[in-house]
Image: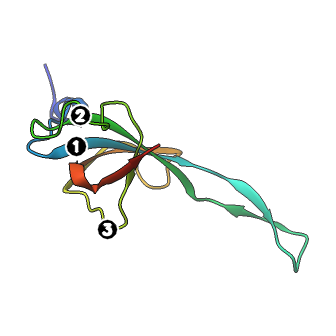
Amino acid sequence: MSTATDEKVNDLARPVTPVGKRVLIEQRMDKRETALLHDNSSKAGEDTGYDVSFKVLAIGEECPKDGPVQVGVSPILGKHAKEEAVKVVEGKMGDKVVIMHLIMFYDDIVALD
């Protein structure tokens, strides 16, 4: 017997298919904790930012299939790129790792890493 909680977890794991000239990109944010030494004191502080990485998971049917953007590459997004949709797959802000799936326009990818 499945419960509403089981269905919600299964819904998060279900793959998303981009349509048109859009791509599905995974954004992974790993929390970093490093010590900082301040000039005016010998006390170390913590910098609790995130290291962010991106990976293409799927390409819409209108995207060039033989182009440089393929599944598995690390895209670099343009300055004014805006996600069309966001789905949090794992974690929440404050956790060690947060993984989100973003739907972006193919043309917002300006380079590959």
Question: What residue did someone put label 2 on?
Answer: 58
Residue occupying image coordinates x 39% and y 35%: 73
In primary-sequence order, the first of circles 2 and 1 is: 1
* Amino acid, disc 2: Ala
Name above or below for residue 54 compared with residue 73: below
User: 24 or 95, which lies in front?
Assistant: 24
Q: Nearer the viewer, residue 18 or 28?
A: 18
Q: State how far apart marks 1 and 3 are (Cα).
A: 16 Å
Q: Are marks 2 and 1 in contact (CB under 8 Å)?
A: yes
Q: Amino acid at mark 3?
A: His
Residue 64 percent location from the top left of the image: 18, 37
Dot 3 crowding, Cα within 10 Å, few <14, some 14–19, many 20+: few
Q: Where is residue 14 drawn, in percent x and y?
A: 19, 30
Q: In the rendered structure, which amino acid carries the disc numbered 1?
A: Val
Q: Residue furthest top?
A: 1
Write the residue at 83% across / 73% down.
Answer: 38
Q: Is residue 26 left or right of residue 84?
A: right
The mark that comes first in sequence, 1 or 3, is 1
Q: Position of residue 49 (x, y in %)?
A: 58, 59
Colouring convention used in this rendered image of the protein = rainbow
Q: Quadrant of the N terminus?
A: top left
Which secondary structure lies at badge 2? strand
Residue at image position (26%, 62%) is 82
For label 3, the SS is loop
Outermost right residue: 42
Is residue 70 at least partly visible in the picture? yes
- The residue identified by callout 1 is 23
Q: Which residue is mark 3?
A: 80
